[in-house]
Amino acid sequence: MSTLKATFGLNGTMTGQSDPVTIAINDFGIDVDNPSVTSGSGTMSAGSKVLIENAAGAGVDYYVYIRNTGTGGGMTGTGKLKITDEHASSVRQISLLEVGDFLFIPIIGDNTDGGVQIMYDTAATNYVYAFFKRV
Amino acid sequence: MATLQSFFNLTGVITGQSDPVSISVNPLLTVGDPSITTGGITTAASTNQEIIAAADADCYLYVRNTGTGGSGGGTGQIEIYTVSSGQLFGDLKAGDFAFIPIKTGTGIKLKYATAVTNVEYAIFTRP
């Protein structure tokens, strides 16, 4: 087992809100299996790509990071990424990433209709991803 | 519209991996004015707690399992479902968090799993 440090924050001021936005998580330890990271990048110009198969198994959970990096990875363009499960007959959408957007989700594995895949939406774009098996 | 500064870092060394983990991003998020919804929930057995309706607009969701009494400890987990399809996809142990851009038509509900715990969340509507 290894421990990674996760830091997350959101800060800013919104007109019409009395208080500023301040969300901060600093160096939260997440325990992952050895060696368990799978990472990659690519271009999504059609179809889909499965990142985590469904029915990964009871207790097989993952921390998943995905980012839409835009045309050529340069954070430009209009291509979006659909994030869905990996159901055999009809996938169910979880998220939609516009250019620059990212997500981080602890994905549950003990679910026969689970898994994660990314799908082309309306225009080609690039992506990066990494997932880690949770202990 | 307003702009929020986000940041996410994931770093460390995994035994058996040749290179260290080093993910660092800090995109600016454009959100509507005023559009934040925040809340805290103590989970209850067999109860789904909808925090984003399926008809709600595109948004960013932050959600964290803050543990027993918000202390970060305990064994209570939180399951994350879509409203539209009832699909279970996420599971937060005490201390875990998720950040997810949500598309209208999806919706999010939270559900107790294994033991009572606390959760905090914030939702920001996209323009």
Image (tube, coloured by chain):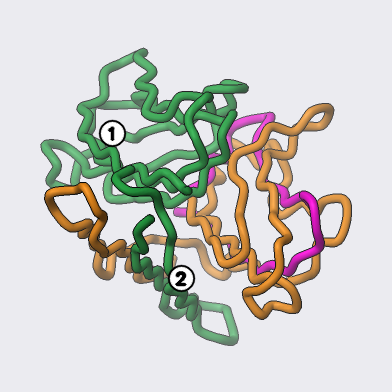
Chain colours: A orange, B green
Which residue is at a point 23% across and 60% down the rendered structure image? Answer: A13
**Quadrant (top left/top right/bottom left/bottom right) for the N terminus of chain B:** bottom left
Q: Residue at x 47, y 48 (%)?
A: B127
Q: Is residue B93 visible?
A: no
Secondary structure of the residue carrying tag 2 is loop
Residue at left offset 26%, top offset 64% = A11
Q: Which mark is residue B76?
A: 1
| SS assignment at label 1 | loop
Relative to A34, say whether A51 is above or below. Answer: above
Of all chains, the one bearing label 2 is B
Residue farthest along the top direction in this orientation: B46
- Of the numbered discs in the image, which one, if any, rests on residue B27? 2
**Residue B84 horizontal/vertical position (percent):** 59, 22
Write the residue at 46% across / 70% down. Answer: B27
Question: Residue A113: within the magenta?
Answer: yes
Closer to the camera, A44 or B111?
A: A44
Query: Which residues lie in the magenta part?
Result: A106-135
The location of residue A88, given as percent across then percent down, is 82, 32
Residue A113: x and y in percent read: 68, 30
List the single residue furthest toward the bottom. B19
What is the three-letter code of the residue carrying label 1?
A: Gly
